[in-house]
Amino acid sequence: MTDRKKVVLDEMAKHIPNSFTYNLAMYQTKRDMYGEDASPWAEKALQQIPENIGRQDASMLIAYLWAEKALQQIPENIGRQDASMLIAYLEMSGKCFSDKKTQETSHELIELLYKNNAYPSYLLRYADNCMRGMEGNALYFINGDVPWYGSRILQEALDLHKDKKVKTRK
């Protein structure tokens, strides 16, 4: 982490410690620092994690704690990058497939992406054109997040193409 970023995060911790912005910035910082030594902000959390969990895994768990705090404070005017980051967290953690409340949060974030015009219309048209040409109950294998988000918005925010299954290729 750069010295400048550390200064900014320290100032945020002093002035807006319980805000969506601070918690999301901490999640992004810890996620990007995966495997590096824990920051002073994480030492207290590290003490609560069992010793048999490796340092890298503990670092990622701490990042998840910040994401969970941010999820409790989602603003109505959330931007595309912030919403995408939290949706990706929900997908990576696997929670959006098992937990009803988390599924609702993921759905809410998708709807906010659409409502706030945070996703370009030409990408929605692209996803719609791809899915419109498929037979019912088709599997749509996609590569990358651009068609994935478009498909999710069409299905969850606009109730279109709900008969198709979208799968990402890894």
Image: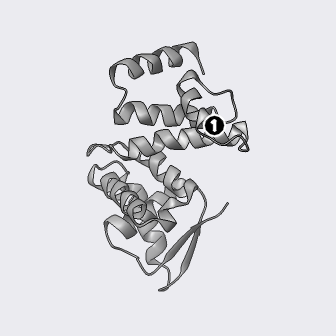
Which of 101 and 146 lies nearest the eye of the viewer? 101
Q: Residue at x 56, y 13 (%)?
A: 3
Residue farthest bottom in this picture:
136
Q: Residue at x 71, y 44 (%)?
A: 53
Q: Please identify the quarter of the rendering in which residue 33 is found.
A: top right
Whether residue 112 sits left or right of residue 150 in the image: it is left
What's the image's color scheme? Answer: one colour
Give the residue pinned by disc 1: 59
Q: Quadrant of the C terminus?
A: bottom right
Which of 4 and 159 lies nearest the eye of the viewer? 4
64 w.r.t. 139: above or below: above
Q: Position of residue 132 (x, y in %)?
A: 43, 76
Q: Amino acid at mark 1?
A: Ser
Q: Residue at x 39, y 21 (%)?
A: 12
21 w.r.t. 8: above or below: below
Q: Please identify the quarter of the rendering in which residue 11 is found.
A: top left
Q: Position of residue 45 (x, y in %)?
A: 55, 34
